[in-house]
Amino acid sequence: MLTIKNVSKTFNAGTVNEKKALDRLSLTLNDGDFVTVIGGNGAGKSTLLNMIAGVYPIDCGHIYLDKEEISLLPEYKRAKLIGRVFQDPLMGTAADMEISENLALANRRGKPRTLRWGITKEEKVQFKEDLKRLGLGLEERMSNKVGLLSGGQRQALTLLMASLQRPKLLLLDEHTAALDPLTAKKVLDLTKEIVEEQKLTTLMITHNMKDAIQIGNRLIMMYDGKIIYDVKGEEKQKLTVNDLHRKFREASGEEFSDDRGVLI
Ligand SMILES: Nc1ncnc2c1ncn2[C@@H]1O[C@H](COP(=O)(O)OP(=O)(O)O)[C@@H](O)[C@H]1O
Ligand SMILES: [Mg+2]
């Protein structure tokens, strides 16, 4: 499904700010893998997702999606294949457009991005149904501007939009980190539902170690631009937060923490 071979990325090469964010990283995901990604601040987690999505070019290596090399495809072409949800609820949706218009744009991913033909009746019916499943009452607010929604509602909508045209890959970058705990749980439950139902191959960065253990079928830990631990199935399910701390210490010689403090 997704194959990453020997990918490196250095920012600000040749300057005092030079930073090797990815260091000859390789990773292969199987069809339907739901992988949680953990690692301290600056480990290269977001850079990994950005490289897959094509936000910046890679320095070397190859990225294949479904056997097709995508490393040289521009970001907008990869967006037809890849759904994304970021940490910031403001990023995934257009605030000054209606809920239904946002959904219509997502529904036409890969086709010319225009609403010239309006939203069809069939789309409206489908959107209403989709929104109902979020359980947030948004189906009654389809003509509201998205800017009126709360952060959690916007993340739920972004998630729905990202999965509307079943993507080959779903990339989630701490997409619940900016939400209050209750809303974060709701959006996370919704994530599990959508991923399981559509059997989406998914990479989900999280700073919550318990979530990383409980969710998905595989877990990778990053440090200094590399994957230092990769575990799946039963072995993953049996892990404790303490195990993860120990693995991190063994591989890095440091304590596992980030700017939010020690990770739990
Ligand atoms: N656009 C960029 N320009 C310069 N440096 C960057 C850029 N993006 C990331 N970095 C650096 O690369 C390293 C990895 O960053 P990042 O992938 O965001 O880490 P993480 O998501 O694991 O916290 C960090 O040292 C960060 O400062
Ligand atoms: Mg990050």
Image (tube, rainbow, N blue to C red):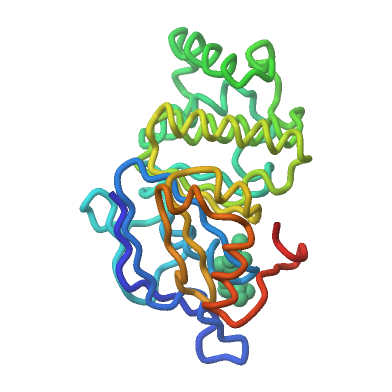
Estimate the x, y position of residue 164 in percent, counting from the top left: 45, 28
Q: Residue at coordinates 50% horizontally, 45% vertically from top-left?
A: 84
Q: Residue at coordinates 39% horizontally, 37% vertically from top-left?
A: 200
Ligand 1 quadrant in view:
bottom right
Q: Which quarter of the rendering shows the C terminus? A: bottom right
Q: Is residue 113 left or right of residue 154?
A: left
Residue 156: image quadrant is top right
| Residue at the outermost left position | 67
Q: Indicate whether 18 appears above or below 38.
A: below
Estimate the x, y position of residue 20 in percent, counting from the top left: 51, 81
Estimate the x, y position of residue 107 in percent, counting from the top left: 44, 27
Q: Indicate whether 85 appears above or below 43.
A: above
Q: Is residue 250 left or right of residue 203?
A: right
Q: Nearer the viewer, residue 243 or 97?
A: 243
Q: Residue at coordinates 64% horizontally, 28% vertically from top-left?
A: 97
Estimate the x, y position of residue 8 in percent, counting from the top left: 40, 76
Residue 16: image quadrant is bottom right
Q: Nearer the viewer, residue 178 or 81?
A: 178
Q: Nearer the viewer, residue 235 or 12?
A: 235
Residue 19: image quadrant is bottom right
Q: How many marks?
A: 0
Q: Indicate whether 59 appears above or below 133.
A: below
Q: Residue at coordinates 47% horizontally, 23% vertically from top-left?
A: 116
> Is residue 108 visible to the viewer in this orientation of the structure?
yes
> Is residue 72 visible to the viewer in this orientation of the structure?
no
Q: Nearer the viewer, residue 80 or 163?
A: 163
